Image: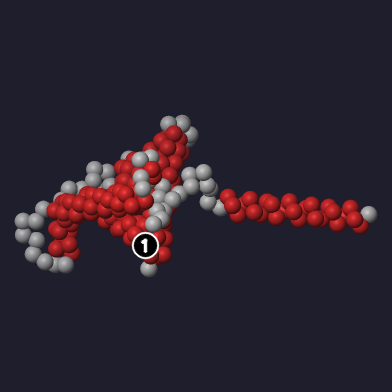
Amino acid sequence: MMKYLDHLEEIIITFLIGMATVVVFVAVVHRYLSGVPIPGVQDWLLTINMSWAQELCIYMFVWMAKFGAAYGVRSGIHVGVDVIVTRLPDTWRTKCVILGIAGGALFTGLIGTLGARFVWENGMHYALFNKLGMTIGDLYEGPITPDLEWPTWIIYSAVPLGSYLMCFRFLQVGWGFFRTGELPHHDHGAVDGLEDMVDATVALEEYEEHKFEKAGGAK
C-alpha cells in the first residue's frame, strides 16, 4: 500500500512540473511568434488565446510545492539545522527529534484541517450538494478563477491534501525513528542513476583492457 502511495506522490509531482514546463514553453513561443510578421501564421496565432497559461502554471506550481513538501519529509531533503541536536546525548537527542517531528505533524495537521474547512465553505459544499441533488438553500456557490473560470475550491484543495499528506509523512518518519532510531537522509551530492552509469563505465573499461591483453597475448 505504501509503495503505491509513494509512486502516486512521485507521479503527481513529475506530471505537474513537466506539464508546467510545457505550458510555459508553448506560451513563450506563442507570444514571441505572434509578434513576428509571418504572413498567415501571425494572424492565426493572434486568434489563439493563451492568457490562461500563466494562471494554470501558478496553480500547478502551488500543487507541486505542496506535494513536493510531503515528498521532502519522506526522503529527508528538507534543510534542517541540527548542530546542537547532534551534540546532545543520545537520550536528549531522541527526545528533541521526536518533539520536532511531533511539532511538524501537529502544524501540518492544523493547516490541513483549517484548509479543509476553508475549501468546504468556499464552494465545495455547494458543488457536492448540487451534484447529489440535495437541497442547496442559501449555500455559497463560491468564486471562480479569472481566466480558467474554475471553481476556486478545487485550486485551494491543494492546501488540505498536501498538508494532510505531509502530516502523514511526519508520522511515518516519527514511527520509523521510534523503531530504528534512524531518520531519512538524502545525500545532496548523489545523483540518481549515476552509480549505475559508473559501474557500467568501469565494466566497459575492464572489458577493453581484458580484450587488449588477450590480443597482445595472441601476437
Q: Which of 113/171 is in front? A: 171
Quick one: which residue is furthest to the left in this view? 138
Q: Position of residue 175 (x, y in %)?
A: 33, 60
Q: Position of residue 136 (x, y in %)?
A: 9, 61
Which residue lies under the disc numbered 1?
179
Residue 198 shown left or right of residue 183 in the figure? right
The correct choice, above or below, for 49 with respect to 157 in the image is: above
The coloring applied to the image is secondary structure
Q: Can residue 71 be seen by looking at this rendering?
A: no
Circle 1 Cα neighbour tier, 10 Å, few/some/many (<14 / 14–19 / ≥20): few
Disc 1 marks which amino acid? Arg
Q: Residue at x 91, y 57 (%)?
A: 218
Q: How many marks?
A: 1
The correct choice, above or below, for 195 with respect to 80 in the image is: below
Instruction: Quarter of the image for the C terminus: give it.
Output: bottom right
Q: Residue at x 46, y 31 (%)?
A: 37
Instruction: Quarter of the image for the N terminus: give it.
Output: bottom left
Q: Can residue 193 be seen by looking at this rendering?
A: yes
